[in-house]
Image (cartoon, rainbow, N blue to C red):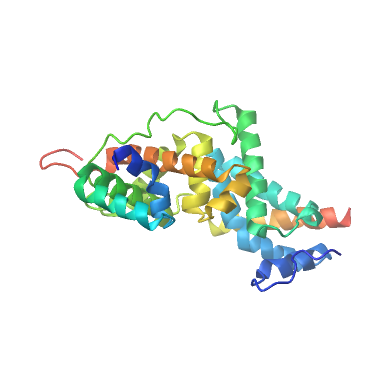
Amino acid sequence: MPAIQSPGTEEIHPDVALVARAREGDAAAYEQLVRQYERQIFRVAQHITQNREDAEDITQDTFLKAYEKLEQFQGNSKFSTWLVRIAVNESLMRLRKRKTSKTVSMDEDVQTDEGSIPRDFAEWRPNPEQIFDQNELNDILQRTIQGLPPGFRTVFTLRDIENLSTEETAEALGLSIPAVKSRLLRARLQLRERLSRYFRQRKEGQPA
Amino acid sequence: MNCTDFLSQLTDYFDGQISPDLLSEVRTHLAGCSHCQVVLNTTRQTIEVYRDNEVYEISDELRERLHSAIMTKCLEKKRA
């Protein structure tokens, strides 16, 4: 079996050993990897597709595909990034099938800056958590992210919600680093602008 | 530095990947521009509100169901 990571001074990620065991047929090792990442994969799929049934199917398909392709995992990237890449591809495929959006390709460069130019300059006071209860807040956050083009919300999900680095996001999406940065900026600014409608500081006497 | 230049540096600024020279320009601009201060604060809050509130948290029940389905399919694959 080829070495999946060359020995070096870098600390070896614990997943590397689990992947090696899973490749040799150790189902318990693979099960541990599934446990570690099933929540994340579900969240990513749900954020991209905005559809719970799709997210459930994608979560299953992602881990099944990864299991089948375990031999192809080179260990150049983190196992989790590799999984996310599979999940993103599956999610974009679902979106294309549903054709609910015009732009479902990650490499499509969205040229328009519409919505990315700040127009609302009110502070958010008090904090959103202090104005809305958890259900209302979740509803606002869901509706707002749904309105973003899929390419933008995917980058925002990976970078800002799942905490992937710019490099990992670029790798998972097959995008260049400048493309990730540009989408991330526009995603953040568009979300900020839309959320400002709900969260902006109100003048006295102004209804919420 | 004007407001457009400031916006173009926002991502690197949040990531702490900005050169010292640019950082000092960003700070000078911020000190004199209340609009960009608001954009900076509320963009930070945008990131935080999504990070702190798991919009699509999976229930334990669904997680178990998905987990069993995944492992059953993988083991079937292994036997095939």
Q: Position of residue B41 (x, y in %)?
A: 29, 50
Locate residue A186, reporting x and y percent.
Answer: 43, 38
Residue placed most toward the observer, B26 or A28: B26
- Compared across the picture, whether A136 is left or right of A3 comes to left
The image shows a total of numbered marks equal to 0
Q: x%, y% of residue B75?
A: 80, 58
Q: Nearer the viewer, residue B65 or A142?
A: A142
In the displayed structure, A80 sits above or below B11; it is below
Residue beneath the point at 66% across and 53% down: A83
Q: Which residue is rendered at x = 45% and y = 35% of the image?
A: A148
- The residue depicted at 26 percent of the width and 37 percent of the height is A120
Q: In this picture, is A149 found above or below B27?
A: above
- Residue A154 visible (yes or no): no
Quarter of the image with the C terminus of chain A in it: top left
Q: Horizontally, is A40 left or right of A160 in the view?
A: right
From the top left corner, tell me how far across and down residue B71 is, in percent: 73, 58
Considering only vertical position in the picture, is B75 above or below A141?
Answer: below
In the image, residue B32 sits, relative to residue B4, either above or below, namely: below
Q: Is residue A182 visible?
A: yes
